[in-house]
Image (cartoon, rainbow, N blue to C red):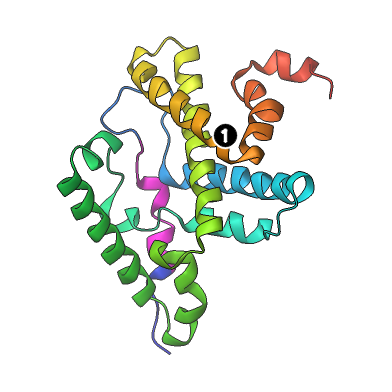
């Protein structure tokens, strides 16, 4: 049986630095990012099911989040401002991401690809799950931003401005996001002492 390079690419994700064009108080890699997005996506799906009559599978939401940046194993992290600088840039980057996702898929044994394609190739992801993972991605970036600002890193001021607006829009259309913000967000940027003292 031929060896697949799929896992070899995945385990390189900790080498991929996020926010590479910005000064960061705390470095973050793509693997850490995907793990945190997976936890948030799982919680969003649970909240949606329990409080808003959703029918999502939280485990699937988490799995999709774990793989949602798989293209970066080939392309590395692309700065959001660069990616969305103009429509032509965006179109070109989206094409590259699609190509990279399909190339990652092709490294798997052929009999596994049909199972993995809806997890790896973003154009094949169910729209309802895609929305949950995207919201989780934005919330994770917001937590990162607030922690950088907590240590007076002004590089993230403009990021907060953009994310504030985006999260306000999400709250209107996704009540599970509003619940997540109310329940979890403040404690994500507090000190260890305050966490230890907190009572639920």
Task: List x then y, in percent, for residue 192.
Answer: 67, 18
Task: List x then y, in percent, for residue 150.
Answer: 50, 13
Q: How many marks?
A: 1
Q: Characterize the local packing of mark 1: few (<14), some (14-19) or many (20 or more) Cα atoms within 10 angstroms.
A: few
Residue furthest to the bottom in view is 1
Residue furthest to the front in view is 172
Residue furthest to the right in view is 199
Quadrant of the frame with the N terminus: bottom left
* 85 or 13: nearer the viewer: 85
Q: Is residue 95 above or below residue 13?
A: below
Residue range in magenta is: 7-18
Q: Is residue 57 above or below residue 107?
A: above
Q: Is residue 39 left or right of residue 166?
A: right
Quadrant of the frame with the C terminus: top right
Q: Is residue 173 above or below residue 74?
A: above
Q: Residue at x 33, y 53 (%)?
A: 72
**Which residue lies under the disc numbered 1?**
172
| Residue 60 figure quarter | bottom right
For mark 1, give the secondary structure: helix
Q: Is residue 53 visible?
A: yes
């Amino acid at each position: 049986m031929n060896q697949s390079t799929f896992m070899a690419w995945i385990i390189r994700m900790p080498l991929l630095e996020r926010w590479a064009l910005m000064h960061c108080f705390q470095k973050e890699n793509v693997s850490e990012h995907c793990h945190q997005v997976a936890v948030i996506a799982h919680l969003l799906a649970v909240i949606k099911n329990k409080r808003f009559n959703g029918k999502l599978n939280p485990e699937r939401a988490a799995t999709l989040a774990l793989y949602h940046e798989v293209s970066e194993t080939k392309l590395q992290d692309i700065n959001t401002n660069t990616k969305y600088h103009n429509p032509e840039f965006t179109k070109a980057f989206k094409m590259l991401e699609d190509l990279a996702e399909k190339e990652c898929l092709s490294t798997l044994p052929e009999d596994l690809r049909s199972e993995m394609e809806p997890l790896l190739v973003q154009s094949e992801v169910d729209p309802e799950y895609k929305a949950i993972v995207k919201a989780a991605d934005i919330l994770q970036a917001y937590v990162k931003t607030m922690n950088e600002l907590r240590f007076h890193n002004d590089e993230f001021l403009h990021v907060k401005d953009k994310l504030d607006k985006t999260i306000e829009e999400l709250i209107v259309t996704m009540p599970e996001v509003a619940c997540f913000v109310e329940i979890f967000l403040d404690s994500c940027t507090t000190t260890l002492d305050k966490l230890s003292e907190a009572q639920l």
